[in-house]
Image (tube, rainbow, N blue to C red):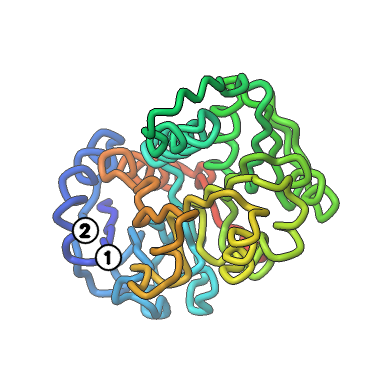
């Protein structure tokens, strides 16, 4: 029996994904028909981007699962017409890209690279940075991406604390959870990395109160979600010197408006949502494997918990 797979995303994504998806599905020996158009009642699976034209899932009466192409699901998880399992993208290519981006910006802060780049004024500043073991880094969010980043940082020797809403255990990482755990995780954090999902419970995780918990002169790296930070509170903390610098890859409005104060602020580095991305070659393998598992009666990977929003 042929499995009908609808690719529901922007047209340019089809150009990128058609061949990798077809190859990955063939490799997993799924008998498939992959298209961008089907009669809704004929569709078994939807490979999905939340910005596609498919917003009402009611007509898809044969649908078994929706396989999200994005790591974030905040734009689809609340869709009341979606009654079948929703999976989020946990892609080893995306994970590796995130590890590399976070490591680069963490080392930038740890080694004081900016000071050497901008300090070419003839003064001999013979001050070596501490070893990584003496630098405290906190990762907020210990899902697939956060856990991988925390382990990579620990592998380089950093003193890593991780925080999540629920209890976690990760080798070489001191794990905290809950409100008191957040206070403990921030209180010694010289560098904070945000990799929490975007939910009502995580909005403004960094605000005036929590920013004040951090050691004066700490740095922030946010490749997670823009709403995790109260922008006004961060700008005030930067201006006061409570926070020394922030590297921000994600924002409440994207592209970041040209008039936004982050662009001109001397203590902010803006990157245009490039910390990592879903790679078609590796993401296609994840999607194909999930379809194979479901057809073989095995549990889907990376199923979203609707009650938590991720």
Mark 1 to mark 2: distance in Å?
6 Å
Secondary element at tag 2 = helix
Q: Which residue is mark 2?
A: 13
Q: Would you say 127 lies left or right of 186 here?
A: left
Farthest-out residue, right:
180
Residue 169, which numbered label?
A: none
What x and y, as percent, mark residue 132?
Answer: 61, 22
* Image marks 1 and 2: residues in contact by CB distance under 8 Å: yes
Number of numbered tags placed on the structure image: 2
Q: Would you say 178 lies left or right of 201 here?
A: right
Q: Residue at x 21, y 55 (%)?
A: 34
- For disc 2, the neighbor class at 10 Å (few under 14, some 14 to 19, many from 20) is few
What x and y, as percent, mark residue 167?
Answer: 77, 43
The quadrant of the rendering that contains the C terminus is bottom right
Q: Quadrant of residue 170?
A: top right
179 relative to 22, above or below: below
103 relative to 25, above or below: above
Q: Residue at x 64, y 67 (%)?
A: 233
Which of the pair 137/263 is nearer the observer? 263
Q: Which residue is mark 1?
A: 9
Say if residue 79 shows up in the picture.
Answer: yes
Secondary element at tag 1 = loop
Which of the pair 65/246 is nearer the observer? 246
What x and y, as percent, mark residue 153?
Answer: 57, 28
Say if residue 306 shows up in the picture.
Answer: no
Q: Quadrant of residue 234?
A: bottom right
Q: Quadrant of residue 284?
A: top left
What x and y, as percent, mark residue 286?
Answer: 38, 42
Q: Residue at x 43, y 50 (%)?
A: 89
Which of the pair 4/286 is nearer the observer? 286
108 relative to 74, above or below: above
């Amino acid at each position: 029996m042929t499995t009908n797979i609808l690719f529901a995303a922007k047209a340019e994504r089809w150009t990128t994904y058609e061949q990798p998806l077809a190859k990955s599905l063939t490799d997993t020996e799924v008998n498939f028909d992959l298209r961008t158009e089907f009669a809704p009642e004929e569709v078994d699976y939807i490979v999905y981007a939340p910005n596609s034209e498919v917003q009402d899932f009611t007509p898809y009466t044969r649908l078994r699962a929706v396989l999200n192409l994005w790591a974030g699901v905040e734009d689809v998880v609340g869709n009341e017409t979606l009654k079948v399992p929703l999976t989020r993208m946990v892609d080893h290519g995306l994970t590796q890209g995130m590890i590399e981006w976070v490591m680069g910006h963490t080392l930038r802060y740890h080694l004081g690279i900016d000071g050497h780049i901008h300090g070419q004024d003839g003064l001999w500043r013979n001050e070596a940075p501490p070893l990584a073991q003496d630098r405290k880094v906190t990762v907020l969010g210990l899902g697939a991406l956060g856990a991988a980043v925390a382990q990579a940082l620990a592998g380089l020797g950093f003193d890593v604390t991780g925080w999540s809403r629920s209890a976690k255990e990760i080798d070489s990482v001191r794990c905290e959870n809950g409100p008191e755990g957040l206070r403990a995780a921030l209180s010694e954090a010289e560098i904070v990395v945000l990799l929490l999902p975007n939910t009502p419970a995580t909005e403004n995780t960094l605000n005036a109160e929590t920013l004040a918990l951090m050691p004066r002169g700490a740095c922030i790296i946010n490749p997670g979600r823009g709403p995790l930070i109260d922008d006004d509170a961060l700008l005030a903390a930067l201006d006061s010197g409570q926070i020394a610098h922030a590297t921000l890859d994600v924002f409440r409005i994207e592209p970041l408006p040209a008039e936004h104060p982050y662009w001109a602020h001397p203590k902010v580095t803006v990157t245009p949502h490039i910390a990592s991305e879903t790679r078609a070659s590796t993401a296609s393998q994840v999607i194909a494997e999930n379809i194979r598992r479901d057809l073989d009666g095995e549990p889907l990977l990376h199923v979203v918990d609707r009650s938590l929003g991720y």
